[in-house]
Image (cartoon, rainbow, N blue to C red):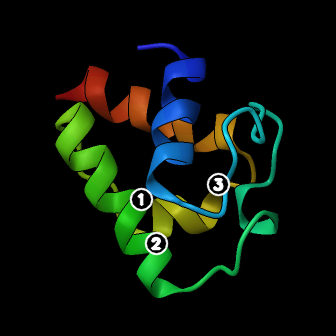
Amino acid sequence: MSVEKFIEKIEDEFEELEPGTLTPESNFREYFEWNSVNALIIIALVDSEYDVTINAEDIQKSETVNDLYTRVLELKEAS
């Protein structure tokens, strides 16, 4: 799993994000209205694509796409 592929999957989930919008350094909350529904979308995406369970706290602690990606990798390695 690469950060680029992770970004592609996030961009695919949110219609308001055009492909190529996000970078690893992007604060993903700045690109669309952030709310609990969007957090649930991210949680479901990570669960279905990477077989890892993240929670709201994981998302809240992540400022950038790379922060979130790193957390997913940590959880994947721990499982």
Q: Earlier in the sequence, mark 3 or mark 2?
A: 2
The x and y percentages for residue 61 are 62, 61
- Numbered tag placed on residue 42 in the rendering: 1
Between the residue at mark 3 and the residue at mark 1, the CA separation in whole angstroms equals 12 Å
Q: Are marks 2 and 1 in contact (CB under 8 Å)?
A: yes
Query: Quick check: 24 left or right of 51?
Result: right
Question: Which is more foreground, mark 3 or mark 2?
Answer: 2
Query: Quick check: 62 left or right of 51?
Result: right
- Numbered tag placed on residue 62 in the rendering: 3
Question: Which is more foreground, mark 3 or mark 1?
Answer: 1
Query: Looking at numbered disc 3 in the image, what kind of residue is underneath it?
Result: Ser
Query: Quick check: 46 left or right of 47?
Result: right
Between the residue at mark 3 and the residue at mark 2, the CA separation in whole angstroms equals 12 Å
- Numbered tag placed on residue 39 in the rendering: 2
Q: Number of callouts in the render?
A: 3
Q: Is residue 73 above or below residue 65?
A: above
Q: Is residue 33 above or below residue 29?
A: below
Q: Earlier in the sequence, mark 3 or mark 1?
A: 1
Mark 2 closeness class: few <14, some 14–19, many ≥20 residues within 10 Å: some
Query: Looking at numbered disc 2 in the image, what kind of residue is underneath it?
Result: Ala
